[in-house]
Amino acid sequence: MRLIKQKRLSHKRRRGRVRLKISGTGVRPRLAVFRSLKHIYVQLINDELGETVAEASTLSPELKENLTNGGNIAAAENVGTLIAERAKQQGIEAVVFDRGGHLYHGRIKALAEAARAGGLKF
């Protein structure tokens, strides 16, 4: 039990350090990633106004019907492609990547590379 609390605390600290250094604007919003065991969620956030510009997740209607598992690398790639498409619709080409305290590995990396392949710059 103590190890679980320590892991959560460490993750919270890492996430806080990342958030101190980056901030999204209207021209270059923050691409914030949240990862759970079953799903992955991503938002484009304008921190100056405190609003979400666009969002995508494995629960989005476009993806939900085609995915059998929302917690794998293939699902993260689909979410990355979808957020890049929605960003283009909003006229956004550049973002600041917020990995949410997670390592740039696995699902986080797959989502980021798919978003880059979709045309986002970060």
Image (cartoon, helix red, strand yellow):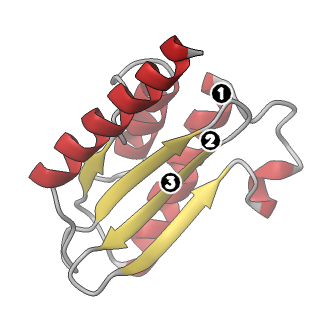
Disc on the earlier residue, 2 or 3: 3
Q: In this rendering, would 46 be left or right of 56?
A: left
Screen quadrant of the N terminus: top right
| Pair 1/3: label in front | 3
Classify 10 Å Cα crowding around label 2: few (below 14), some (14-19), many (20 and above).
Answer: many
**In this orientation, does residue 6 appear?**
yes
| Residue 42 circle label | 3
Classify 10 Å Cα crowding around label 1: few (below 14), some (14-19), many (20 and above).
Answer: some
**In this orientation, does residue 122 appear?**
no
Viewer-side residue, 18 vs 31: 18
- Residue, disc 1: 74
Point out the residue furthest to the front here.
2
- Residue, disc 2: 78
**Residue name at image x 53 percent, y 48 percent:** 81
Disc 2 marks a residue whose amino acid type is: Asn
Q: In this rendering, would 19 be left or right of 81?
A: left
Disc 3 marks a residue whose amino acid type is: Val
Say which element carries label 1: helix
Q: In 3D space, how far apart are the residues under numbered discs 2 and 1 (Cα atoms)?
A: 6 Å
Q: In 3D space, how far apart are the residues under numbered discs 1 and 3 (Cα atoms)?
A: 15 Å
Q: Where 80 sits versus 10, above or below?
A: below
The spot of residue 51 in percent (x, y) is: 39, 82
The spot of residue 114 in percent (x, y) is: 46, 38
Question: Could you tell me if the residues under marks 2 and 1 are in contact, i.e. CB atoms within 8 Å?
Answer: yes
